[in-house]
Image: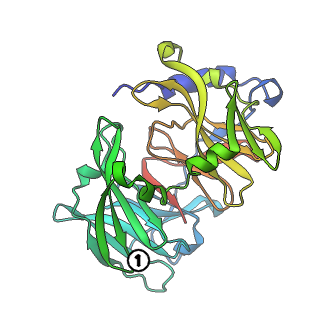
Amino acid sequence: MKKTIYFLAIFAILSACREGNQENGHNELQPADTTVAEVILEKPADIAYTQCPLAYLIDGQLYFHSFDDNKKVKFVEESDTIFNFTFDAEGKTLYYSVERDGSLWLKSAVISDSKITPQWVVDWKLKKDDCITDTYGEISPLLYHKGELLMEHGFVWDYYDFRKFDIYSIAGKEKKSLDKESDGRVLGKFMTELPRNKADQYFKTTKQQLYYTRNNVKVCLSDKLDFNVLRNKESEDYWVETEFISFTLSPDETKILYGTIIEMGDLGHGPYCIANKDGSNQMILEQTDIGSNKNPVWLKNNSIIFTDYEKNLFVANNDELSIQKIAENVSLYGAR
């Protein structure tokens, strides 16, 4: 499917247009550091997995990332190719899927133990190809919520999305299959975005600007940003008035991540943005696109992790208005 946002064109436009500052409608970002972390440690003893706030997959191998000296350590306890992964609420137990005899299986490992021993949990009874999108070839994430794990599957072109999902109860040791159309509320529990009723309560769009209202105080979260520099002139027929979607709060609830729709093709397209609740430090994550199923993820220190379509992994800090590339060829990522 033809993408309606061409990121190479976007980067060229932004390079030419980044002379302004916040006062004239542009954020003066620090240049993205394209130096990829090269320090890879093979032994878990060098860095404990539980010391790392971030993990990601490269070529089916899981790496835990420490921002101290940009070091990463490989999850050496698993020899099979890992398909997707997640953590429990405390970040002490790793859950992940591997392929076995043509089927995806769920495994677990308590990474806080002194001796880590992966355990087979359950056969998802799903083929790997059933859990990959037909749009951009993106992997279905593994989601955790209150003792349950969820795996989406069954991509349908009519919806440009997966239409089914399986849920595994860790305590009950049972798996059930559900459908998004009839069981969407169940799926919603696993999502980090604010539910629709909450989003409508706090966020309003007026004259293509996003406003956040709480305790009778109305703050604009987008007036320092210029989305026009991201609109691709070659696809002008797809331009739409700016809309705002997909609101999530930082761990300390002082910052807001939201998506924008600035073009509409088969899917809506546009970048994610960050702003403080008081409207300060507004920032466009220029390498992102809401058309991807890889949503940016908050780290516990209120930074954001995300990938672009080239599978480059970035960390963004809106307090510093900085974006730094920390890894390449990343298929999936998660915070712990």
Q: Is residue 163 above or below residue 120?
A: above
Q: Is residue 78 above or below residue 214?
A: below
The residue to which callout 1 is attached is: 109
User: In the rendered image, is residue 11 in sight?
Assistant: yes
Quadrant where the image shows the N terminus: top left
Q: Residue at x 38, y 62 (%)?
A: 150
Estimate the x, y position of residue 285 in percent, counting from the top left.
Answer: 61, 38
Q: How many marks?
A: 1
Q: Which of the 4 image quadrants contains residue 34?
A: top right
- Mark 1 neighbour class, 10 Å CA radius: few under 14, some 14 to 19, many 20 or more: many
Q: Residue at x 76, y 25 (%)?
A: 25
Q: Is residue 102 left or right of residue 151?
A: left
- Secondary structure type for disc 1: strand
Q: Is residue 6 left or right of residue 125?
A: right
Name the amino acid type tagged 1. Ala
Q: How is the image coloured?
A: rainbow
User: In the rendered image, is residue 231 in sight?
Assistant: no
Estimate the x, y position of residue 55 in percent, counting from the top left.
Answer: 50, 61
- Residue at the extreme left of the image, as rendered: 101
Quadrant where the image shows the C terminus: bottom right
272 or 99, nearer to the observer? 272
- Residue at the extreme bottom of the image, as rendered: 114
Q: Is residue 21 left or right of residue 307?
A: right
292 or 78, nearer to the observer? 292
Q: Is residue 237 above or below residue 64?
A: above
Estimate the x, y position of residue 35 in percent, counting from the top left.
Answer: 58, 45
Q: Residue at x 23, y 59 (%)?
A: 126
Q: Is residue 270 left or right of residue 137?
A: right
328 or 304, nearer to the observer? 304
Estimate the x, y position of residue 226 in percent, counting from the top left.
Answer: 69, 25
Q: Is residue 184 above or below residue 23?
A: below
